Image (cartoon, rainbow, N blue to C red):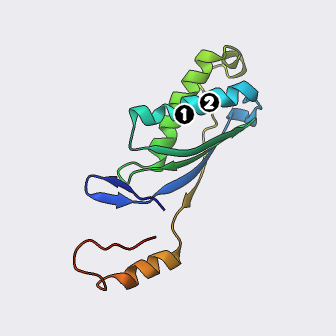
Amino acid sequence: MECDKQGHAVYYIRYHIVIATRYRRKVLKAGMGEYLKRTIRQISRHYPEIRLIEVNTDVDHLHVLVSVPPKLSVSQVVSLIKSNTGKAMRDKYDFLRYVYFGKGGIWSAGYFVSTVGIDEEIIQRYIEQQGKEDRGQTKFEF
């Protein structure tokens, strides 16, 4: 298990996010899915604290496993993903402008999210080890 570090925090916060296309239209065909994966990975260039661990698509939805720092909310990250990828997809594939006309983008309004974390047994062992090593940094292996 690899923890992330930021300023004065060490964290292991992982989310599984699923974002569906609007109206569940099956528009993410072969090459489009690959382009979407490349586009979503560019978010980490502009926001290095957001670490994309795994990205995959189906014809009507996107799966992302992402590490998010405690200073950001899941809704902020989903908003970044939707806005950046939606615009890039519409710019690259003209037909999406006709499939999704109007103000709405290619993504549905909602999303699914679940946490992915370390289990209770590991946390319990970690707490039990406190004070058993020297008073310096604890060298507990997860």
User: What's the mark number on residue 40?
Assistant: 1
When asked about the image quadrant of residue 96, the answer is: top right
- Amino acid type, callout 2: Leu
Q: Nearer the viewer, residue 65 or 74?
A: 65
Q: Residue 92 at what x, y percent from top left?
A: 62, 16
Q: Residue 84 at what x, y percent from top left?
A: 51, 29
Asked whether, in this view, residue 28 is left or right of residue 42, the answer is right
Q: Nearer the viewer, residue 77 or 120?
A: 120
- Amino acid type, callout 1: Ile
Q: Residue 5 at what x, y percent from top left?
A: 34, 54
Residue 55, placed above or below residue 121: above
Query: Which residue, as the protein is rendered here, is positioned at the far left?
Result: 135
User: Does the CB distance between marks 2 and 1 fall below 8 Å?
Assistant: yes
The residue positioned 54% from the left and 33% from the top of the image is 40
Asked whether, in this view, residue 79 is left or right of residue 71, the answer is right
User: What's the mark number on residue 36?
Assistant: 2
